[in-house]
Image: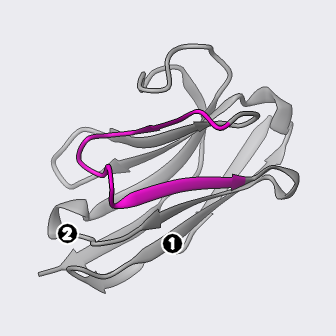
Amino acid sequence: QVQLAESGGGLVQAGGSLNLSCVISGRVYFTTVIGWFRQAPGKERELVAAIKYTSDDIYYADSVKGRFAISKEFFKSTLWLQMNALRPEDTGIYFCAGRQSELPLAAPRDYAYWGQGTQVTVSS
């Protein structure tokens, strides 16, 4: 199995920054794509960024493009989501998740492994 653990959430004012991290353990080779999702109260879970674990292919949702940056350190099995210029609408629980399928990076499906999530709250 694969375990993912997020950290780095918190409360920040609009315009501020946070850097989320996701540590992967267990059978890391079970995952080929890692995605960052968020779920706001009353809304569906949204894929905001994804990265192929063994290449530089990256996807960003239009809502975060130019403000968020996903990165990884392969040998530490760690990924980050640097979030800048945060807005109140970025508020939600942020999850990292892993999948093995070869669907396009923008596809939010087939994620089999999930972390517990970390809360991000952006005040106006």
Dot 2 crowding, Cα within 10 Å, few <14, some 14–19, many 20+: some
In this view, 54 is above or below 81: above
The label on residue 19 is 1
**Residue 116 shows in the view:** no
The quarter of the picture where the N terminus appears is top right
Tell me what residue is drawn at x 45 percent, y 21 percent.
Answer: 109
Q: Nearer the viewer, residue 21 or 93?
A: 21
Residue linked to disc 2: 87
**Quarter of the figure with residue 30:** top right
Q: Which residues are magenta?
A: 56-72
Q: Residue furthest top?
A: 102
Tell me what residue is drawn at x 42 percent, y 22 percent.
Answer: 107
Mark 2 vs 1, N-terminal side: 1
Q: Position of residue 78 (x, y in %)?
A: 73, 57
**Residue 58 shows in the view:** yes
Give SS at disc 2.
loop
Tell me what residue is drawn at x 28 percent, y 72 percent.
Answer: 85
Is residue 70 a member of the stretch shown in magenta?
Answer: yes
Q: CA distance from mark 2 to mark 1?
A: 15 Å
